[in-house]
Image: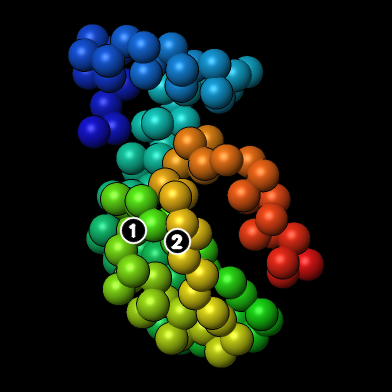
Amino acid sequence: MLNPAVIEEKVPGFAAALENLHAPLDWKTVMNKTAELLVRLGNGEGLKEEEFRKIDVPVVLCLGSGDQMVSLKETESASQLLPQAEVMIIEGAQHMLEKTDPALIAEVIGRFQ
């Protein structure tokens, strides 16, 4: 899913949107680096439980109701490791914030300033 050559070939409109979204950076580099990050996380290189437990500031983990990348279970598991965390479901939001109403995002951020 994170292969720039395949995306350019099969979904050129999406490739053009990514190019525009990430300009002036090269969207292909951004995608390749994202893929590398996901592989590293999948190989256990993310934060460890003991590191999560050291984050002792208020944290709100937001999850879009339409998110297909991160599950509620994963979000709740992370929140249980953080001493001052809460989970908030944002109705109608997806994983990509660009697809969510900016006014809704601003409202959510405003609640926790």
Name the quadrant containing residue 55: bottom right
Q: Is residue 49 left or right of residue 4?
A: right
Q: Disc 1 to disc 2, how far (Cα)?
A: 8 Å
Q: Indicate the amino acid at tag 2.
A: Leu
Q: Is residue 50 left or right of residue 106?
A: left
Residue 100, percent from left and from top: 52, 41
Vertical placement of 1 versus 4: above or below?
below
Q: Which residue is mark 1?
A: 70
Vertical placement of 89 versus 54: above or below?
above
Residue 39 visible in the snapshot: yes
Residue 93, percent from left and from top: 46, 49
Q: Earlier in the sequence, mark 1 or mark 2?
A: 2
SS class, disc 2: strand
Residue 47, label in figure:
none
Residue 63, label in figure:
2
Residue 68, percent from left and from top: 29, 50
Quadrant in the picture for the N terminus: top left
SS class, disc 1: loop
Quadrant in the picture for the C terminus: bottom right
Mark 1 or mark 2, whichever is nearer to me? 2
Q: Is residue 62 left or right of residue 41?
A: right
Residue in the picture at 29% in, 32% down: 2
Residue in the picture at 49% in, 74% down: 87
